[in-house]
Image: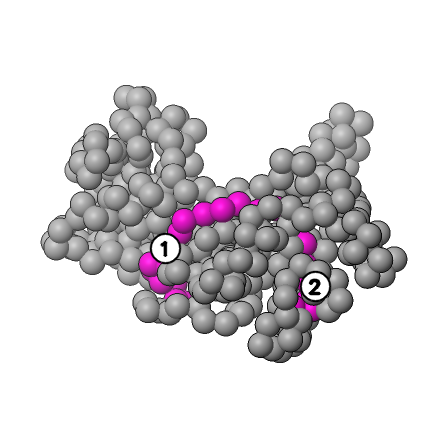
Amino acid sequence: MAVVVIQPSAGNAASRRRWADTLGQEVPFTVPEREGLLSQEQRQALLELHPSGRARFWGASSFQNGKMKDVHFGDVVLFTGQKKVCGIGEVGVLFDNAAFADTLWAPGEKGSWNNVYSLLSFQSTEIPYEEIWALPGFNAGDNFMGLRILDGDKAEAVLQGLGIIPSVSLQQDLVRENEVAQALAQGTQVVDLENVHTTRTSYQTAGRRVLVQRAEALLVREYINSLEGCETGRLRVPVGITDIHVTGPDGTEIIEAKSGAGHQYVRAALGQLLDYVAHSPEPVDSLSGLFPEKPAEISIALLHRYGVDCLYRQGPGDFQRLPAPLAARERMAKVWTGG
């Protein structure tokens, strides 16, 4: 699993200047004053990943050498500052070259930003720290000072919780689908996943952006703000992280939000809810799917058949609940609990 790098990058004027110079725009690395400072291996790796001769870059000082050893191609970077995640990218080519770094950024108090890395993909964002604080394993008030490397459960929590789908993962899924299609067409046995290899040269950066699903997060935030007298959070279970976990006068509820109200979104929400509730460490009184608009009647009927409520947005801060029939909820509650 890729690690997640929390990279302070916009907290002061100097950082914001570096951002404008090398994150806000692509930088040519084949110009004479830079290309001659690259080793043959570094130049070749950059051109394989960025054939246009231009890329976005960031760097870390020698003070962070130890941490940067744990960073690799495809790892996700959260660029932070001013109490928000200002951008999300993926590590491309990573190399140690102080002379090259000095052509990108003036050395700081701790010297050159010698741990240079290009960005395979990049997207500007406006994600408040509160969304990370709400994830399992994080604490409110953490301002993410200094470079931080997250792995394991914390990295997974960030990717799931912020709706980040790395472009590397999408590319690997596409390669896998192609392998499966070819195998089926040829009547051969499907190859093991371990035998499917994707090299750096198979990636093309034209138009590439890490996918950040913000619609669901915004819907979740608006719904939580509409609640009164309830405690809300996110529940981590072995199969993932719930969008909303509510404890209030009506008991405990797990809610799964979707960015659309089409039948495919309703089916996805239903499947996740039934998976989450089976692994809940405490009894759950109700399950609900949350949608940006009212789903079709056939989709609502699907939720109700399994005892799941339908929540949908009618307007700013205004949500409507269509409760499942009590008999269906009571019948399905036995399934939820394994009884």
Q: Position of residue 29 (x, y in %)?
A: 75, 51
Res 278 visible: no
Say whether residue 239 is left or right of residue 193. Answer: left
Residue 206 in percent (x, y) is at: 67, 36
- What residue is disc 2 on? 101
- Which element is circle 2 on? helix
Q: Give the farthest residue toward the right.
A: 40
How many tags in the picture? 2
Kind of residue at badge 1: Pro
As displayed, is residue 216 above or below residue 79?
A: above
Residue at the image position 23 percent from the left and 53 percent from the top: 246
Q: Is residue 139 shown in magenta? A: no
Q: Quadrant of residue 105?
A: bottom right
Q: Earlier in the sequence, mark 2 or mark 1?
A: 2
Horizontal and vertical percent position of residue 303: 30, 33
Disc assigned to residue 128: 1
Residue 272 is left or right of residue 152, and the answer is left
Outermost residue to the top = 297
Looking at numbered disc 2 in the image, what kind of residue is underneath it? Ala
Q: Which residues are magenta?
A: 113-138
